[in-house]
Image (cartoon, grey):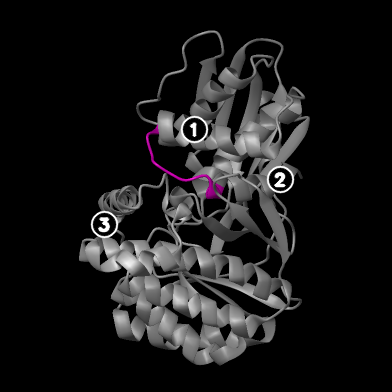
Amino acid sequence: MSLKDKTQSLFAEKFGYPATHVIQAPGRVNLIGEHTDYNDGFVLPCAIDYQTVISCAKRDDRKVRVIAADYDNEIDEFSLDAPIVTHESQQWANYVRGVVKHLQKRDKNFGGADLTIGGNVPQGAGLSSSASLEVAVGTVFQQLYHLPLDGAQIALNGQEAENQFVGCNCGIMDQLISALGKKDHALLIDCRSLGTKAVPLPKGAAVVIVNSNFKRTLVGSEYNTRREQCETGARFFQQPALRDVSLEEFNKVAHELDPVVTKRVRHILTENARTVEAASALAKGDLKRMGELMAESHASMRDDFEITVPQIDTLVEIVKATIGDKGGVRMTGGGFGGCIVALMPEELVPAVQDAVAKQYEARTGIKETFYVCKASQGAGQC
């Protein structure tokens, strides 16, 4: 049963009347541009065909009722007329509550709603299941009540909800690509201006994601440390962000910086340059050059930003040995585990899947999860 059918039938069964709208918002994978978002830099993600789907309808009062299909049909209910506070036992509900609370600050012209939520974005894999939920909920109220909000505003609202209500620090990329993704395209995003440029993926190219299933333990503390190191670097150059520092400027004075901060800064500066060049390579259909840039990105994350782990490096090695110069592969996401992303001609996917299945578990003792994705459309009716 599709997510649309599942959430619609659950809606009718639990609420006793049919949903009027069905909204979807996708997860995402970042092809290149890692840890550049909070440095006001560039990222190149695409939305993927794993999504959050919400069947919904307006209510004629100020109550919001939500049922989560993926959490044993747990129910959350809250009023728009009372202060919206965090739910102590249902973490999923806080993403919904946070989005609605922050929407009220943007536009008070909406009332209650009934929602049933289902999704298939893998959780905890770094594919943005939370951003997908935030953008889907924002789009529900925007569509039901014709709120004058565009995709970027819905994305910013979701980011605020995650940072301030849920209490999880994140950049804007995840919500923005979920809101604005374009079918068969990646999106070059300027994380300072929030300007976007759609970049077509080469015809016949597959987006492959492999989850290492290595349990991430350091990701929270190390993320904050990396962020602080980047801020230290920006202060050294007396700039608001590393986006404003040129490689030439950096190379002249790198020896004056703390050696660890030097490595962190070098990653951000070179990664920004790689990301802009990658958009141009993709637009020309040059998978060979894209592959070189992805390899450089992975090496920089491993050696300068120091956020990979042996299991991830092993996965990258296995995939690269199989695709050669016909595509690219790198770690994607915050680091210390999680997923790798690869871009390759569709016909190479079976060989890659076979190589990973034969070698990864044998070398690491962990079984991977393999996803073949398509670049998909951003949030909207489905």
Using the numbered discs, state the Cα–Cα distance from disc 3 to disc 2 in whole angstroms.
35 Å
Helix or strand or loop: what does disc 3 sit on?
Answer: loop
**Label 2 sits on residue:** 4
Residue 45 horizontal/vertical position (percent): 59, 60
In the picture of the structure, the residue carrying the numbered disc 3 is: 217
* Secondary structure at numbered mark 2: helix
Q: Which residues are magenta?
A: 166-174
| In the depicted structure, whether residue 203 falls above or below residue 375 | below
- Compare residues 149 and 323 and report the one nearer the observer: 149
Going by the picture, which residue comes out furthest to the left? Answer: 258
Q: Where residue 272 appears, x then y in whole percent?
A: 50, 63
Dot 2 amino acid type: Lys
- Please indicate whether residue 240 sits to the left or right of residue 304 in the image: right
Task: Sort mark 2 into few (<14), some (14-19) or many (20+) by Cα contacts within 10 Å.
Answer: many
The disc, 3 or 1, on the residue closer to the chain's N-terminal end is: 1
Q: Would you say residue 326 sits in the magenta stretch?
A: no
Which one is nearer the viewer's eye here, 181 or 77? 181
Q: Secondary structure at mark 1?
A: helix
